[in-house]
Image (cartoon, rainbow, N blue to C red):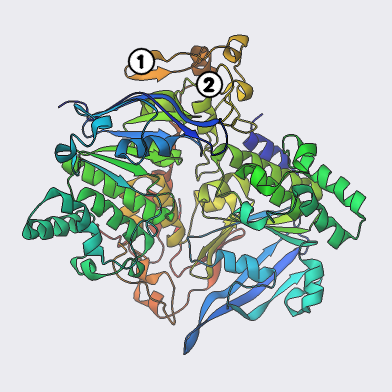
């Protein structure tokens, strides 16, 4: 049985729908200062809810705001960024209003993140086992011996070859795939309810990537947690996520169940993205306009209007609503594409 | 016209400082590239793809084996300096890191012309032509790299390679750092340049989907060996080496129902290139393994026209799943889904490409 099949098997346990969402992001806005001018809004009101057992994909190109969203959910927007508004509800609390001390108890324990570039994340001077065990010691309050036992079990769960020996390895002795597994082990050892994977598989080779994805799916299913899976690779989300949100210029422009997003995409930006993966020049010509001019931020109207082949005057004047086009299928577009 | 590039039994071993051991990066690579042809070189990191490219452009000296550009032996690069000048060019992966941030775009593009001893006017004209070739506006000649998007920066990288009118361009992961839309534009651009100028490409990439659509032929590398090479269509539709098959099965196409069938699921990690196993390098990960594979390296067997495979059981591998052209099925599906759509509320006023 191959990795993707394992993935689909593990996913067959249906997400318990109808329940209140595990995490509910409401109108999240993040700004960056820009010299003397008005601050630049990089997240323009994000609404996204994820239920237990669900894997939601978040796709977008570089600069769309993916990492800013991941870090803002954890209460630590990157660099000089500032959370300018909105709420994040998690396990019954609005966590953005928590004190730093309270947030710190949540981060790593109930909410955790798997980052790309695992080697930069790991402390080069500490042995792998000690780094993983320290997560359990800090957050679960277990003693050193128990923490090491949990760490070893975690290394087994992430299917690192020869886990006993890897406990004593330093990060530089691990391959990229193994280092990524260690970072996943650290993110999951406290059995978090919500995991954010921020482009965690992009640096990996495809065969390793398939194994890591299967592993993440299995662990999420076994632990009954939920995941926000952030990636540039739209292809992964087609095989791996229950629902997919498409981020463009700090806004979710389309949100749909997996099948609907790929078989009946509604937002022109989504169509352009899919067209660029199709290797069909004809399709790309229909759905893109050449990127010759500098991109500009539109004060009002649709952010995509300047790049949209079907934009009308109204698109530059009025921000489109995030309207439902089908069951659970939303698009922020005045003229969503209809199929059939 | 004669073959542009011939590599015969190339080896490259890197010594490890303070040790008698070596990293066996390339272990007997042979390939040819014809004029106007694209050879896609695919494989995972550490498979030796980049090292092959660097040996061709002369950044690395091979340990053994020969590389010929047309009839010139590249080991004697210095002797053929004049006739080789500008004939082989390289495009790098990271467009922003491979451009000098303090140098204007025009100067970056014209630099490779300096050894060609052209007069100033010819250099200026060739630079302007190169810029036009990659579809950048003439006013960008005075811009600095930081003023450009990464897609535009990579166009500059391509213009810099094309300005000398090379016969062979080594493209080392030219699209990996780019967003999907910029990537697709660069692929189109490379195809168009090739059809206009008949340039041969060695296209190094781990992105199989891109390789499928840009390459005429493809070579699959694993631990410094080309385990299979043949026409892109044959190798992708009916791989005969278990590694090619396993690599293809890891491709995730952006379609929830399309997946490349394979009887091989690659588990575990690539063995270390310092201590290569005896016999076939894939034996420890291969579901088709037989005892012989662990003792004996399978020789290159010719299984079709310019199609070779290093596997004792290539017939069983080929027969294990029905042949299928999944990449093209996906393209047709995409055309069906994205092509039939009509925007609601407005008459379709789809953009017409300007030429």
Q: CA distance from mark 1 to mark 2?
A: 19 Å
Q: Position of residue B296 (x, y in %)?
A: 54, 12
Secondary structure found at label 2:
loop
Q: For residue B332, say whether it is visible.
A: no
In the rendered structure, find residue B304 and report the number of the disc placed on it: 1
Q: Position of residue A226 (x, y in %)?
A: 73, 56
In the rendered structure, find residue B37 and report the number of the disc placed on it: none
Q: Nearer the viewer, residue B245 or A128?
A: A128
Q: Is residue A112 above or below residue A38?
A: above
Asked if labels 1 and 2 share a chain, the reply is: yes
Task: State yes or no: discs 1 and 2 in contact (Cβ < 8 Å).
Answer: no
In the rendered view of the protein, which quadrant contains the N terminus of chain A? top right
Which mark lies nearer to you, 1 or 2?
1
Mark 1 is surrounded, within 10 Å at the Cα level, by few (under 14), some (14 to 19) or many (20 or more) other residues, namely: few
Chain at tag 2? B
Q: Position of residue B132 (x, y in %)?
A: 18, 58
- Residue drawn 51% across the image and 12% down it: B312
The quarter holding residue B147 reads bottom left
Sequence-first tag of 1 and 2: 1
Q: Is residue A16 above or below residue A291?
A: above
Which residue is situated farthest in the bottom direction here?
A36
Q: For residue B230, say whether it is visible.
A: yes
Q: Nearer the viewer, residue B281 or B245?
A: B281
Secondary structure found at label 1:
strand
- Residue drawn 30% across the image and 45% down it: B90
Q: Which residue is mark 2?
A: B321
Which residue is situated farthest in the top direction here?
B292
Q: Is residue B228 above or below residue A145?
A: above
Left or right: where A208 falls relative to A100: left
């Amino acid at each position: 049985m191959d990795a993707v099949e394992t993935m689909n098997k593990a996913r067959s346990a249906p997400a318990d729908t109808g329940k209140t969402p595990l995490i509910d992001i409401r109108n999240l806005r993040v700004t960056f200062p820009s010299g003397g001018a008005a601050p630049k809004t990089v997240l323009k009101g994000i609404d996204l809810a994820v239920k237990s057992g669900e894997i939601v994909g978040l796709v977008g190109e570089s600069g769309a705001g993916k990492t800013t969203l991941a870090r803002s959910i954890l209460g630590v927007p990157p660099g000089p960024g500032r959370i300018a508004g909105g709420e994040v509800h998690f396990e019954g609390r609005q966590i953005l209003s928590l004190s730093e001390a309270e947030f710190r108890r949540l981060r790593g324990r109930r909410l955790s993140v798997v980052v790309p570039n695992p080697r930069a994340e790991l402390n080069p001077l500490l042995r792998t086992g000690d780094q993983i065990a320290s997560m359990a010691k800090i957050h679960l309050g277990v003693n050193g011996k128990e923490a090491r036992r949990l760490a070893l079990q975690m290394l087994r769960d992430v299917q690192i070859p020869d886990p006993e020996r890897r406990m004593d390895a330093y990060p530089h002795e691990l391959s990229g795939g193994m280092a990524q597994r260690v970072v996943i082990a650290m993110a999951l050892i406290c059995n978090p309810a919500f995991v954010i994977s921020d482009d965690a598989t992009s640096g990996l080779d495809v065969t390793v990537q398939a194994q890591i994805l299967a592993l993440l799916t299995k662990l999420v299913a076994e632990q009954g947690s939920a995941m926000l899976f952030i990636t540039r690779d739209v292809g992964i989300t087609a095989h791996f996520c229950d629902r997919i949100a498409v981020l463009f210029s700090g806004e979710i422009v389309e949100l749909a169940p997996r099948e609907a997003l790929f078989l009946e995409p509604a937002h022109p930006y989504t169509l352009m993205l899919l067209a660029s993966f199709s290797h069909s020049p004809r399709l790309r010509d229909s759905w893109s306009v050449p990127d010759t001019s500098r991109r500009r931020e539109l004060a009002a109207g649709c952010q995509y209007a300047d790049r949209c082949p079907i934009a009308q005057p109204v698109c530059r004047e009025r921000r489109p609503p995030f309207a439902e086009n089908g069951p659970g299928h939303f698009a922020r577009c005045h003229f969503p594409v209809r199929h059939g | 016209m004669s073959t542009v590039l011939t590599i015969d039994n190339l080896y490259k071993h890197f010594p490890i400082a303070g040790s008698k051991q070596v990293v066996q990066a390339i272990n007997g690579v042979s390939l040819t590239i014809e004029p106007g042809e694209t050879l896609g070189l695919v494989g995972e990191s550490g498979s030796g793809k980049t090292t092959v490219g660097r040996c061709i452009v002369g950044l690395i000296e091979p340990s053994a084996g020969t590389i010929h550009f047309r009839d010139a032996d590249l080991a004697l690069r210095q002797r053929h300096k004049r006739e080789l000048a500008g004939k082989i060019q390289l495009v790098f992966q990271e467009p922003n890191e491979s451009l000098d941030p303090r140098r204007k775009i025009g100067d970056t593009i014209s630099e490779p012309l300096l050894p060609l001893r052209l007069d100033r006017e010819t250099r200026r004209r060739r630079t302007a032509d190169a810029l036009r070739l990659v579809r950048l506006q003439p006013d960008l000649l005075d811009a600095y790299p930081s003023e450009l998007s990464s897609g535009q920066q990579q166009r500059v990288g391509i213009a810099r390679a094309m300005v000398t009118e090379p016969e062979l361009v080594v493209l080392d992961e030219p699209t990996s750092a780019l967003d999907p839309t910029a990537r697709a534009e660069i692929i189109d651009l490379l195809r168009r340049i090739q059809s206009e100028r008949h340039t041969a490409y060695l296209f190094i990439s781990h992105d199989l989907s891109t390789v499928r659509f840009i390459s005429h032929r493809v070579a699959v590398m694993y631990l410094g060996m080309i385990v299979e090479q043949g026409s892109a269509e044959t190798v992708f539709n009916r791989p005969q080496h278990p590694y090619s098959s396993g690599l293809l099965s890891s491709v995730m196409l952006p379609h929830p129902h399309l997946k490349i069938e394979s009887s091989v699921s690659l588990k575990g990690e690539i063995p270390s290139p310092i201590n290569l196993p005896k016999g076939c390098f894939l034996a420890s990960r291969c579901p088709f393994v037989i005892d012989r594979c662990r003792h004996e390296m399978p020789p290159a067997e010719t299984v079709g026209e310019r199609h070779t495979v290093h596997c004792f059981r290539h017939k069983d591998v080929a027969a294990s799943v029905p042949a299928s052209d999944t990449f093209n099925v996906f393209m047709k599906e995409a055309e069906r889904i994205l092509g039939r759509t009509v925007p609601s509320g407005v008459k379709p006023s789809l953009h017409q490409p300007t030429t």
